[in-house]
């Protein structure tokens, strides 16, 4: 099987890069997350799936620092950490690529890549050549070859190309964990393939990747492991090579809450 | 010797012609995709000049050329500020009366007798500071509290007009006698100084372009369109020396005139503000906020700060424009800032190609739009048309400019993606 060979090649490590234990979160009287465990390792693509209202977005927003957890612990690289705001998350090396991309259409690729982090001298004059150079290098290292010129405005790019820019931007800042929220939701078949290939390359380069998607096909094509949430609780953790779409769909629609914090480490490491 | 030189020259000419061809191709690509740039507005300006040269006897003279420059200076200053506000997708309706506040403040501060009788060199900076405070206040209400800029600046429009009327109702007007203030509207450089200024402008541009190319080459980044860069430098040299040459032949009743100070002010702010918009992190963030404020916020840009600074720029440019406009007539009266000043300034920015929806536009748009409006108004005046005609023609040009831009953008949407 070609796919499982790809899995073996990935530099998956044993200790989770990010580990959440017993996370709870409520909005007023609505309990969005109850005692949720989650983990992702460097070099691994972890899918986060669940029906609408399962708590996927809440979990991600808490990790990204836009919301605060009510209870639970976060471990990053084995150390317990606290995330109080987006800046804390960014300092840890966590980057989120949101569904609506957060790109400026009127700016070109380089300008978007460096948005808010422009290189400048003491006069705040922009240093365009190094920014252009590094953007080109990043694009090349991620094998994003479909963009004709990194100096063209993002408005002229296709959906897949725009998604690639958003992902590349997340990667460029020495990030360790990249979270992708529905990266293929608005894309056609060819564009989707483009983005999924990019997601796999991120893991191959040793990053931890979390992908949220409604599309099981996409998930079975990219993810190493799959975490399923239902009604704000864990209902299953599956290894892609040892499960079926059928099993995952059942968990999404009718899964019983399980406590998965004691997942045996050996079970998850490929072979 | 010949064997070496032969292939080299061949390669060189081939390189140049390939460069020209790629230049032509990108030009055609741009036009086809609706990215017209400044081409339509420059063509319109040429057409307007040609039209009035034939229809008005005193239009195409060196003296009148200087007049047009002086007439456009005040409005163009306001329009420069409008570009920044429009880049954010906001609007500033208060600028004409903030200009009035700038003019009133200098007039008050220089007033001899019962007034403080300050030198214009002190009065002008103080007036600009006053306008900066107004801009900061208006900008803060927009950015921090979230009141729409249309409402905040409409209130400003009424309030600052009220202040002007309140102060000037009794005297009716204040005469400006300070020579420094009046220089902004009526000083002419000597012929030699004019040539030196042109040389400085062209030299400065060439050096900045060259250093840009060198740093790009050093970083190993491709340098786009070398022939285009050369063409731009040559075109600027022709324009700069041409303007000075024309101004230097102007005479009023036998007294030779020269390059007006107003021309230098226009170009100085064009350069400084273009630098600010295109070459600094602040300018980049203005475009970002105008393109997608949420994306800018997520990228860590302090969006309220950018908004406040832009309204500050708008008010400061209005104040500077107001001082120049007051200097043109050597006084400030109760009607100052009224009439079509506000709409001329916004029209200038929009005619030049600045989008009303944010994120798209350049400072030079205001320069070209200001030139078009001043030329049309001057031409119609010179040809002896009824003032009503001036409004109608300005309105038609505004409508045409925005229509061309809208159609061009629709083509762009079709060509892109």
Image (tube, rainbow, N blue to C red):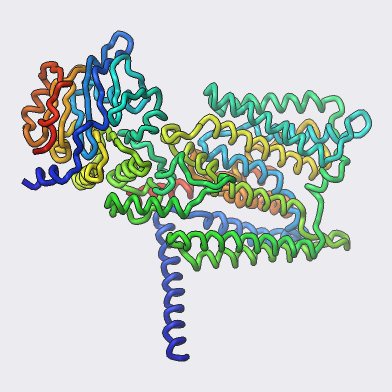
Q: Nearer the viewer, residue B11 or B55?
A: B11
Q: Position of residue B22 (x, y in %)?
A: 41, 67
Q: Position of residue A227 (x, y in %)?
A: 17, 27
Which residue occupies 65% across, 26% down?
B156
Which residue occupies 52% across, 37% down?
B88
Q: Quadrant of residue B167?
A: top right
Which residue occupies 78% across, 47% down?
B184
Evaluate whether residue B257 shows in this view.
Answer: yes
Q: Position of residue B266 (x, y in %)?
A: 69, 50
Q: Residue furthest top?
A: A29
Q: Quadrant of residue A85?
A: top left
Q: Position of residue A242 (x, y in %)?
A: 6, 33
Evaluate whether residue B393 shows in this view.
Answer: no
In the depicted structure, whether residue A124 falls above or below residue A260: below
Q: Residue furthest bottom?
A: B2
Which residue occupies 71% across, 41% down?
B321
Q: Nearer the viewer, residue B79 or B382?
A: B79
In the depicted structure, whether residue A115 falls above or below residue A47: below
In the depicted structure, whether residue B151 falls above or below residue A178: above
Q: Count the marks: how many?
A: 0
Question: Does B374 sit left or right of A174 as displayed?
Answer: right
Q: Nearer the viewer, residue B89 or B67?
A: B89
Q: Quadrant of residue B116?
A: top right
Q: Nearer the viewer, residue B179 or A145?
A: A145
């Amino acid at each position: 099987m070609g796919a499982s060979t790809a899995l073996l090649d990935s530099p998956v490590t044993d200790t989770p890069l990010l580990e959440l234990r017993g996370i709870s979160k409520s909005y007023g009287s609505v309990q969005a997350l109850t005692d949720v465990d989650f983990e992702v390792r460097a070099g691994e693509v972890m899918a986060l799936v669940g029906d609408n209202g399962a708590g996927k977005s809440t979990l991600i927003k808490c990790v990204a620092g836009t919301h605060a957890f009510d209870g639970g612990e976060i471990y990053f690289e084995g150390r317990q950490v606290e995330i109080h705001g987006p800046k804390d998350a960014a300092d840890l090396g966590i980057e989120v690529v949101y569904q609506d991309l957060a790109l400026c259409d009127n700016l070109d690729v380089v300008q978007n890549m460096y948005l808010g982090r422009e290189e400048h001298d003491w006069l705040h004059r922009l240093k365009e050549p190094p920014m252009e150079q590094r953007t080109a290098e990043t694009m090349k290292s991620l094998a994003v070859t479909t963009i004709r010129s990194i100096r063209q405005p993002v408005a002229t790019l296709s959906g897949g190309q725009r998604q690639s820019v958003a992902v590349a931007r997340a990667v460029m800042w020495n990030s360790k964990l990249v979270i992708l929220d529905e990266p293929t939701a608005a894309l056609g078949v060819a564009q989707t393939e483009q983005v999924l290939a990019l997601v796999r390359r991120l893991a191959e380069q040793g990053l931890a990747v979390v992908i949220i998607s409604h599309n099981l096909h996409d998930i079975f094509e990219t993810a190493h492991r799959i975490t399923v949430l239902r009604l704000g609780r864990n209902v299953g953790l599956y290894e892609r090579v040892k499960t079926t779409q059928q099993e995952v769909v059942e968990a999404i629609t009718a899964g019983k809450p399980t406590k998965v914090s004691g997942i045996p480490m050996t079970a998850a490491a490929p072979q | 010797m010949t064997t070496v030189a032969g292939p080299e020259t061949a390669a060189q000419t081939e390189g140049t012609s390939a460069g020209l061809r790629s230049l032509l191709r990108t030009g055609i690509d741009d036009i086809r995709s609706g990215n017209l740039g400044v081409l339509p507005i420059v063509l319109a300006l040429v057409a307007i000049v040609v039209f009035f040269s034939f229809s008005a006897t005193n239009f195409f003279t060196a003296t009148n050329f200087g007049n047009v420059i002086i007439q456009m200076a005040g409005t163009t200053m306001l329009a420069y500020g409008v570009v920044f506000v429009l880049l954010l997708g906001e609007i500033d309706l208060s600028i004409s009366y903030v200009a009035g506040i700038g003019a009133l403040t200098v007039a008050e501060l220089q007033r001899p007798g019962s007034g403080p009788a300050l030198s214009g060199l002190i009065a002008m900076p103080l007036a600009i500071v006053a306008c900066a405070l107004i801009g900061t206040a208006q900008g803060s209400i927009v950015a921090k509290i979230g009141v729409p800029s249309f409402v905040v600046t409409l209130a400003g429009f009424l309030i600052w007009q009220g202040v002007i009327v309140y102060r000037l109702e009794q005297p009716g007007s204040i005469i400006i006698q300070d020579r420094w203030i009046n220089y902004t509207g009526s000083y002419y450089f000597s012929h030699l100084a004019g040539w030196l200024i042109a040389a400085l402008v062209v030299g400065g541009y060439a050096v900045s372009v060259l250093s840009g190319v060198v740093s790009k080459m050093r970083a190993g980044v491709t340098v786009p369109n070398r022939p285009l860069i050369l063409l731009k430098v040559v075109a600027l040299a022709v324009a700069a020396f041409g303007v000075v040459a024309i101004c230097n032949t102007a005479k009023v009743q036998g007294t030779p005139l020269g390059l007006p100070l107003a021309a230098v002010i226009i170009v100085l702010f064009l350069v400084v503000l273009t630098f600010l918009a295109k070459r600094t992190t602040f300018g980049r963030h203005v475009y970002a906020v105008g393109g997608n404020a949420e994306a800018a916020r997520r990228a860590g840009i302090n969006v309220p700060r950018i908004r406040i600074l832009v309204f500050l720029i708008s008010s400061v440019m209005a104040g500077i424009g107001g001082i120049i406009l007051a200097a043109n007539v050597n006084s400030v009266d109760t009607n100052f800032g009224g009439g079509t000043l506000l709409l001329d300034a916004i029209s200038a920015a929009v005619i030049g190609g600045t989008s009303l929806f944010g994120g798209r536009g350049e400072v030079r748009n205001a320069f070209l739009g200001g030139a078009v409006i001043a030329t049309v108004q001057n031409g119609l005046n010179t040809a002896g048309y009824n003032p009503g005609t001036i409004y109608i023609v300005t309105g038609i040009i505004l409508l045409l400019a925005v229509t061309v831009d809208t159609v061009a953008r629709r083509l762009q949407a079709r060509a892109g993606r």
